[in-house]
Amino acid sequence: MTSAPFPDPETIAAKLSVLGDQEQSYIKLLLENPKQDDMLIGGLHRHLDNASRAPFLNSLKLENLGKWIGDVAPASLYRVPQRPDGFRRP
């Protein structure tokens, strides 16, 4: 059995831009694997970049996406990186 390759940020951005039931299931599956966190964050950045360049910024759609991701994201995505001096950012 071979494992499927990690999706690239462009694929993730496309899924986030639609975010129907199938896309939500796909993203939830990605969220279960911490090894894919970097690609997921990259896809989110790509989606936000694409949305900011659109002629019409749909802020309600972005707000709903943010709420949905906040509700389903695992704790690993909420980790706060430490600064070298040991002081934690707020």
Image (cartoon, rainbow, N blue to C red):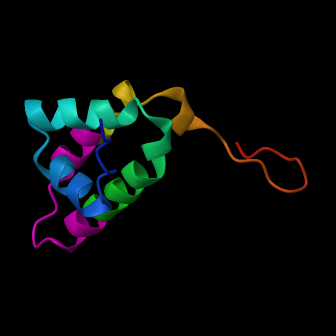
Judging depth in this view, the residue of 22 and 78 nearest the camera is 22
Q: Is residue 73 above or below residue 86?
A: above
Horizontally, residue 29 falls left or right of residue 35, namely left
**Residue 78 location, x and y as percent?**
55, 36
Give the position of the C terminus as an image quadrant: top right
The image quarter in which residue 66 lies:
top left
Judging depth in this view, the residue of 70 and 8 nearest the camera is 8
| Magenta stretch secondary structure, dominant | helix
Q: In this view, does 28 lie above or below 62?
A: above
How many marks can you see?
0
> Which residue appears at 47% of the width and 28% of the height?
74
**Residue 55 location, x and y as percent?**
10, 73
> Is residue 13 covered in magenta?
no
Q: Is residue 66 visible to the viewer in this orientation of the structure?
A: yes
> Which residue appears at 91% of the width and 54% of the height?
85
Q: In this view, does 22 lie above or below 63?
A: above
> Which residue appears at 43% of the width and 34% of the height?
33
Which stretch appears magenta? 48-65
**Residue 73 location, x and y as percent?**
41, 31
Give the position of the N terminus as an image quadrant: top left
Horizontally, residue 37 falls left or right of residue 9, namely right
